[in-house]
Image: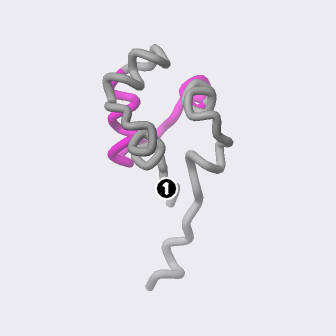
Amino acid sequence: MIRCYLSILMGREKYKIADVARITELNRSTISSLYKETATRVDLEAVDKLCRLFECKVSDLFEWVDESEGT
């Protein structure tokens, strides 16, 4: 499973979904699905814009988690 830490990054900066959409010019639904961790696909351009906004690495935004370890 891939974890997305967009909600944590947004919380640190006190950004709302609308703020991130306006700044990055990404579609609000794209940001919302990443925020809620319901996205099934992510465009590399979106990842690039989010990493630029939060001045982070891709690994700060996403993490692979082995689901079998928790059971």
Q: Which residues are magenta?
A: 28-47
Q: Say which residue appears at 44% left-offset and 85% top-offset.
A: 71
In terms of image quadrants, where is residue 44? top right
Please, which residue is most extreme toward the bottom here?
A: 71
Res 53 → quadrant: top right
- Position of residue 35 relative to residue 50, above or below, is below
Q: Residue at x 37, y 42 (%)?
A: 35
Residue 52 in picture, x, y percent from top left: 62, 27
Magenta segment includes 40: yes
Magenta segment: does it hold 30?
yes
The residue that label 1 is drawn on is: 3
Label 1 CA crowd tier, 10 Å (few <14, some 14–19, many 20+) = few
Work out whether residue 49 or residue 8 is closer to the camera in this orientation and state it.
Answer: 8
Q: Secondary structure at mark 1?
A: strand
Q: Residue at x 40, y 15 (%)?
A: 22
Q: How many numbered marks are there?
A: 1
